Every structure is written in C-alpha cells, then in structure tokens.
Amino acid sequence: MSRGSQREKTVGTPANFVAVFRPTVFRKAFSSTIIALSIAAALCGCGRPMDRADLVLLNGGEPQTLDPAAMTGQLDARIAYALFEGLTSFDQTGTPKPGVAESWEISKDGLHYTFHLRHNAKWSNGDILTSADFLNSWRRTLLPATGSEYASQFYYIHNAKDFNEGKLTDFSQVGVRAPDPWTVEVTLDNPTPFFLDLCAFATLLPVHVPSIEACQKRGESWTKPGKLIGNGAFTLKEWRLFDRIRLVKSPTYWNAANVQMRSIDVLPTDNRNTAFNFYATGVADLMLDKNLTPTAFLDDLKKRPDYHPAPFLGNYFIRFNVTKKPFNDPRVRMAFSLAIDKKIITEKITRAGEQPADSLTPPGTANYDPPPGLTYDPKRARELLAAAGYPNGENFPIVYYLTTGNTGGVDGDIGVELQGMLAKELGVKIQLQRQEWAVYLNSLSRLDYDFCRSSWVGDYNDANTFLSCFVTDDGNNRTGWSDHQFDELIAAAGREADLHHRAEIFRKAEHMLVSEAVPICPLYYYVGIQLYDGSRLGGIQANVIDEHPLKSLFWKTAPR
C-alpha cells in the first residue's frame, strides 16, 4: 500500500533530550518543540485539560478515508484494522490469525475455503455479525459504482473480476456463499498462497451495510463519530480534522477481555520536526510512520534504546507517466534510471540503513528472489538519451518531478538530489513540484504528472503484491503503462501451484518491469523505524509487512 500511535517520557526533560544533538539541529528542534507544545496546549479546552488517552501515537498525515472499500494507504489501513476485523486478522508478527472466523478448512487443490464464524462476533451497535455481512460488504466493494481502487484484491475469487468490471451483474455467480449465518464459503480460480493474508487485508474487511445505506439516504457520512459502526477492537469516539482521532475500546468486540488500551489518540502530522517533538516532549508515546523520524537526528537516535529499526517489504521508487512526452519513450525512462546514483540517496539523505534497490520486489520476499535490474551507468544513460533524440540533453523539454511534503523532508531532499544528478549526467532541466498528499494521490490517479516519487508497502508476504500493481488497468498502476505479455505472465504465475515455477514466471515479469519497459525506477528498500520505550510499551514486533495492530499494544508498567 502506497499502501501506508500515561507514561513519563523515556529520556528525561525535553532540554536533556535535544541537548544530545548538534547545535544547528538543536535550534531546529527547539523551534519545533515550541510548536509541538503550543499544539499540545491547544488540546485543552476552556482552561480544562482534556483527559489523556491511554496511548497517544503518531501515524503520519490525516487519514483520507475510513471506508475500507475506498482506502489505498497504509496510514488509513492502520486505523481501519482497529475499527474493523476480517475473517482473519494480522498478529504482531504480521501473520494472519483467526479473526471473525475462528477456524477454516482448505481443499487439497487450494481452491475452496470454508470459514466458520464466531457466534459471539458483534457489531459495535450490538447487532450479531453473520456470514451475510461479509457477502454484503464484499458485494458493495466489488460493485462498479463503488469505484474501489483496490477491488482487484478480490480477483482471485471466481467471477469477482467480471462482476467488478460490470461484465456480470448477478452477484450470486461470484464464488462466495453463505450456506448458513456462521459459514462463509469461497471458491478461487487458482491456488492463492496468500489468500488468508488477503482475508485480513483492509479491502476485505466487513462493514455494516444497513447503517451505511441509512446514512446515504439521509445524505450523511457514515464514517463520522456516532455514525460509524464497526466490529473491531475499538470504536470511533472523535475525529477532529488536523487535530486527533480518538479510538475507545469496544465492549462488543469478541476478544475485548484481551484488549488492554481503553483509549488511543492518533495525532495527524506529516511534519517530521513537529512529530518528533511530540514524541520527545511526551505528548505522544509511539511513532509508527517510517517517514516521521528526522534524518538529521538518525546518527544519534541509532544509539538509543527507544529506536527500533527493521527492514520490511517496502520500496521507494519513481513512476514515469508513459502517456506523456518525453517519457513515452522507454529509452528516456531507462536513461533517467541509469543516471541516478542510488547509493548517494541512501547514504546522504535517508541514512537509516536502507539498501539501494534495482528491483521492485524486496529481497526476503517469501519464495522469491528478484532479478537484478538497472544500476548506475551514466555513460550508457547518455547514449540512450542521445538515441532518443536528446544528445547531451539538447532540446529536452523541462519536466516536472512531483513530490510530497515540505521542503527539507526526505521526499523534498530526494527531489533536489535527483534534480542535480540528472542535470549533471544528462544535461536535462528538472523542476520540482510539491503537493499535499491528497492532491498528490489525485494527480497520480489522473496521470497529471511527468514523473514522481512513489512508494509501495507489501500488503502480504508475496511477490504478487508488488508485481500485480502494474497489470493493465490495475488501480495502483498509475503510470499509463500496459503490456499484454506482462499481464499474461502475472496471470500465469497466479495459475501456477508449484512455488518454484511460479517464482520463475514472476522473475520474467519483473525483468520486463525494471530492465526493459521501465515505467518505474526503484530507488531503495525501506527500513521501518518505530520510536517507543520498549521497557514500558509492549505488543510491538518487527515484521515484514510493517503491521502493528493497536489491539495488541499494552503497558508493561502503569501508564501516565
């Protein structure tokens, strides 16, 4: 996903905390600390301090949606996993475990799944959750009118793709059945090793369709506090835009006895300095988003016990809009890719131990070794650009690199570095264009850009979660690139039961993607960073899909 957070703070007073850094860093940190403390003070109304949640976390920017059918980002999904629960549910290790389904059987050919639901699963309004809720929710997501960009996550189910594309209008012909209120039967077209992971994934979460339809009839939003009915460990108590989201423990959740946090505040900010100082001053207890840690502090943070890094299945890369000149020419896209020294980016800018990437799929992905891709070769880059009609950058149009965030953040710094590299090696002029996250996502969806920063976090531990994004018309493609042979390879891998042969097919497809057609240019593999006091906060464990369920978190010692 473009994919996508009681106690005393662990480091003494704020002054002691920032004093460990260099003086120039201290001045930046101090000004942001004042901002953070001012915002914290604003969280008090009419002179009376607001009750502090059991846990305060920093998750990144403001969520774009709380509708599982509409979300595409990891930040939104983290909150969705607290409000809703699927047939399966990710645990602390990122492994799918029993959720609403307490057990299941899988046929020998891997095509038929039978899920047995818990009889004590309820919605937050007290309604009993039944198999019909899953069928109604999945139908809602697959309806063409819903416009779910992630509806393709259902395509492994028989006839789901045809129903989503409007070729089939009778949902009863889709491979899902509810023979009784406590059983969900699913029929797949092909063996899908990661289907249990998908059953925990945001797009397949059930929603309370009757309340949604009632809200829509009244012209109301069903995702607001007091309107949203979920089946997860928490309910939505409050959502103040650009302020906080408050989640409170749900008394109707089937496993409520084992949920330790009574309330959680999620503070939205994509400003690194502000977020970091929320944590540094004790306003927040946990930083989850990998993009929130200021790179200027990394050298010092790496020495601290509350710094928790771990590689996971994520990739930072460049997308090219292949529908617009000059990037409609693969030689230009390849030239740009070969002119970028990725090692400089990881050593100079990101600095958290990331490895330069020449494949989209990260090493360590289950049952798969990615093929080698393009590496730094400026001589060949200049030859390709000349062959495309732009020797030494002559007559090359000014193009815009679309990025996100504020000047001085990692995204912005990478943009500046790319600007310099491409000017030096190819003689081309790049202008930087910055947009807020929601506007940026809209620009990608409309193909309203030249080339841009992008990232992808695996939805499950399999190469398919990366490579299937670039199938023609997939909602996550966002490059305009289409290749029938690539589509056929991804489809063939989906039909292959033998894991070795399946991996070979995926390798052929990925070679096309990163070495031949090059609609993308991988830059580096992600390293996740969480900041928290592990001696006091438990329930967090590094895992390859970077999922940390809020229902698993607990205090080892009494919260503040």
Image (cartoon, grey):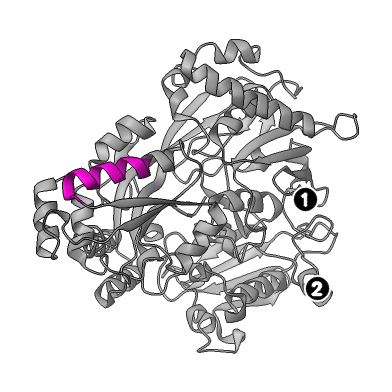
Q: Residue at x 67, y 58 (%)?
A: 66
* Residue at mark 1: 235
Residue 151 in sight here? yes
Q: Residues within 10 Å of mark 1 (few under 14, many from 20)?
A: many
Under mark 1, the amino acid is Thr
Indicate which disc residue 205 carries: none
Under mark 2, the amino acid is Gly
Q: Is residue 147 above or below residue 534?
A: below
Closest to the observer, 469 or 366: 469
Question: Gap between marks 2 and 1, in whole Å?
Answer: 22 Å
Q: Is residue 467 magenta?
A: no
Q: Is residue 553 above or below residue 225?
A: above
Q: Is residue 402 left or right of residue 305?
A: left
Q: Which residues are magenta?
A: 414-427
Q: Quadrant of residue 470?
A: bottom left
Closest to the observer, 362 or 404: 404
* Residue at mark 2: 219
| Residue 277: image location, x then y, percent | 61, 26
Callout 2 touching callout 1 (CB < 8 Å): no
Sequence-first disc among 2 and 1: 2
Q: Residue at x 25, y 66 (%)?
A: 326
Considering the whole magenta stretch, tell me its main secondary structure: helix
Q: Quadrant of residue 415?
A: top left
Q: Is residue 129 left or right of residue 473?
A: right
Q: Is residue 422 magenta?
A: yes
- Helix, strand or loop for disc 1: strand
Residue 516 in sight here? no
